[in-house]
Image: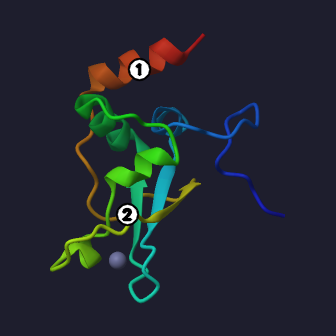
Amino acid sequence: MSLEQDRDHLNRKLRTITHCALYRKTLKLVCANEDCGHVRLLDAVPLWWLFNSQGWDDRLPGAVRHFYCSRCWKGRRWVLRPRYLVTADTPTGEQFTYPPESEWKRLVSRYRS
Ligand SMILES: [Zn+2]
């Protein structure tokens, strides 16, 4: 049985990083370069805060254009966009800056009906 992890409680596909954050998801970014295959598991909560503070459009899949593989970036002029999956995996490695508790609570209360 395959578990759909990229869905909300009404089985709707999560279409923005904000929604991924509210459902405490992890973005799994896989480098599109097959010789590299670098995988990053990023907590959607700090990603929401990053996109929010930068004023970036957080709709998926377009939002992924803001990411690049840190390994392939070195010494190259082009940017390779990673493939991504919305997962319930535990985030690993370095994460982006987490939002202040007050900002996070403000977002959660805005979406709680
Ligand atoms: Zn790479």
In the displayed structure, would residue 99 be above or below residue 86? Answer: above
Q: Nearer the viewer, residue 77 or 9?
A: 77
- Residue at position x 45%, y 74% in the image: 32
- Looking at the image, is 74 positioned above or below residue 6? below
Q: Position of residue 67 (x, y in %)?
A: 33, 57
Taking the image in four quarters, ligand 1 sits in the one at bottom left
Residue 67 in the figure: left or right of residue 74: right
Q: Which residue is mark 2?
A: 92
Q: What amino acid is at disc 1? A: Leu
In the image, residue 66 sits, relative to residue 45, either above or below, namely: below
Residue topped by disc 1: 107
Q: Residue at x 42, y 73 (%)?
A: 31
Q: How dense is the environment of label 1, judged by Cα within 10 Å: few (below 14), some, or many (20 and up)?
A: few
The kind of secondary structure element at disc 2 is loop
Q: In this rendered view, identify the residue nearer to me: 62 or 6.
A: 62
> Residue shown at 43%/37% (left/top)?
58
Residue displayed at 43% across by 80% down: 37
Measured along the vertical axis of the image, is residue 36 above or below residue 2?
below
- What percent of the width, then of the height, locates residue 85? 56, 58
| Residue furthest to the bottom | 35
Q: Earlier in the sequence, mark 2 or mark 1?
A: 2
